[in-house]
Amino acid sequence: MSDRRGDSRPNAARTSAARPSYVVQPARRVAYEVIAAVRESDAYANLLLPTRIQRAALNTADAALATELTYGTLRMQGFYDRVIAEAAGRPVTAIDPAILDVLRLGAHQLLATRVATHAAVNESVELARQVGSRSATGFTNGVLRAIARVSADEWRERILADTTSPDDTLAALYSHPVWVVRAFRQSLRQEGREAELEELLAADNAAPRVNMVALPGLAGYTAELGDPNAFSPTGFVLAGGDPHHLMKDSNGRLRVQDEGSQLAALALSRARPVVEGERWLDLCAGPGGKAALLAAEALNGGASLVANEVVPARAQLVRAALAAVPADVPVWEMDGTWVGEDQPQVFDRILLDAPCTGLGALRRRPEARWRKQPKDVAELSDLQSALIHAALGALKPGGILAYVTCSPHIAETRGIVATARKAWGDKIAPMDTAAVLQGLAVQPLDLAGDPGSVQLWPHRHGTDAMFITLLQRQPD
């Protein structure tokens, strides 16, 4: 039998058979299914989990439990894998992937929740029986009971004692890949804020608040829905309840949108007063949240917006988002790297929310930290460079480009901007992006580093780690 399931233990099957059968609680079943789908098919937990909760008809308490189990397990997967490897006496790569998902979910319950030990172990064993072999249940039982015999604090001490460097220690403690820890350290060092690294890593493991945007001129909100955003003037922090019902009831004019994303769009639309007749472009518009906000801003100022999204399915999401705005907003499906040649010097303002690693949104998409690799940065950097070059080519003289990423990685942010500035020379000039953001923010933003760029942070601003740079094309 395969060693990958612990089947080499001859008494496992007899031990499992002697045990009574347990019914897996629906919340745990949902959490397992989402975790497994993330591994098997690169599913996004934040998109799949609400669907699975609805399909299982979970009540409020079970939905909350399923959410905690799913996100908690995905966030701390790296730490749990180290614990599992020690408890199992083998690397996690030698464990059947489906059983490893069960063990991760069980480890989270044992080490980070108030779930009773017997419930966490017994229901995990039943899950293992359903997704693996009979002997895998004995292996699962043995590993989880070994984990349960040691306190969470002692496991932390054991794991940290085996780390090999300061960055590996932080990677283990806060459950981030080492390369991500190093990238965050480098970005914070650029601001003279390297001492904030642990605070940032901890913030990535905290559940984010739900921010809503009220499309300007089209929607408002009352105090009973929530408190105003700390910084963005166009939204609020949801006090509670289901945001999807609120979106539906407002015909999409109240929308879930991170405060950092709101600020990124507003940095472009409010960089200077809008002149009637201006033409704007959202170059990489999917899934459409920033496009909807820009469309509302354009409508209020007498400008027109075009949205572009090369992926057809995402283009459909953009169209759905734009349906909330009573304006004619064409949605193109063109390769954005050609916009400079196809539409030379056409647009007064362009938002380039460039495809990126998404390392700035690990609070909301915890699986991204395990899904991305350093090689992805290099591949994306080539695309980002091509897109920013094309966007600058499509700008009118005097036009403004907002280069935005939901990643703080220097190779995707300051590096891309620096390369573009070198290539374009005195044809483009940086704007005081920090002054623009401070001018529109409700409260002063704690910003650091070069004022030509703004890096937002979850630990400092309560937003995703959005990077924003404003560039102006100079007259020929």
Image (cartoon, rainbow, N blue to C red):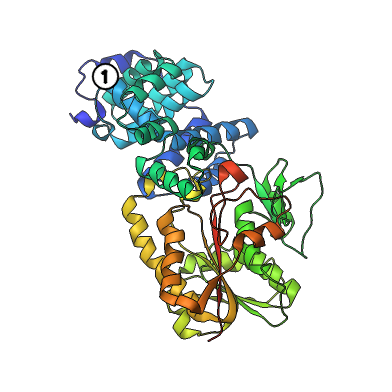
Q: Is residue 70 visible?
A: yes
Q: Where is residue 445 in the image (x, y as percent from the top left)?
A: 65, 50
User: Which residue lies under the disc numbered 1?
Assistant: 13
Residue 97 higher or lower than 253, as above or below: above
Count all numbered tags in the image, as a single digit: 1
Q: Is residue 460 left or right of residue 276?
A: left
Front residue of 400 and 283: 400
Does residue 276 lie above or below 129 as drawn? below
Q: Which amino acid does label 1 sit on?
A: Ala
Are there few (<14), some (14-19), or many (20+) residues within 10 Å of tag 1?
some
Q: Nearer the viewer, residue 351 or 224?
A: 351
Which quadrant is home to the N terminus? top left
From the top left corner, tell me how far across and down residue 118 is, in percent: 46, 15
Q: What element carries label 1?
A: helix
Asked if residue 316 is positioned above or below residue 154 in the image, the reply reads: below
Q: Residue at x 36, y 40 (%)?
A: 178
Q: Quadrant of residue 390?
A: bottom left
On screen, residue 316 versus residue 60, left or right, reads left
Q: Residue at x 31, y 21 (%)?
A: 87
Q: Position of residue 433 (x, y in %)?
A: 60, 62
Give the answer, above or below, for where 221 lies relative to 136. below
86 relative position to 230: left or right = left
Please give the name of the residue rendered at 51% of the width and 84% of the height, measured from the top-left corner: 343
Query: Could you tell me which residue is drawn at 56 percent across and 47 percent down?
Result: 457
Which residue is at the front of the view, 205 or 109?
A: 205
Residue 368 can be seen, yes or no: no
Nearest the viewer among 398 and 226 is: 398
Q: Percent x, y for residue 225? A: 77, 46
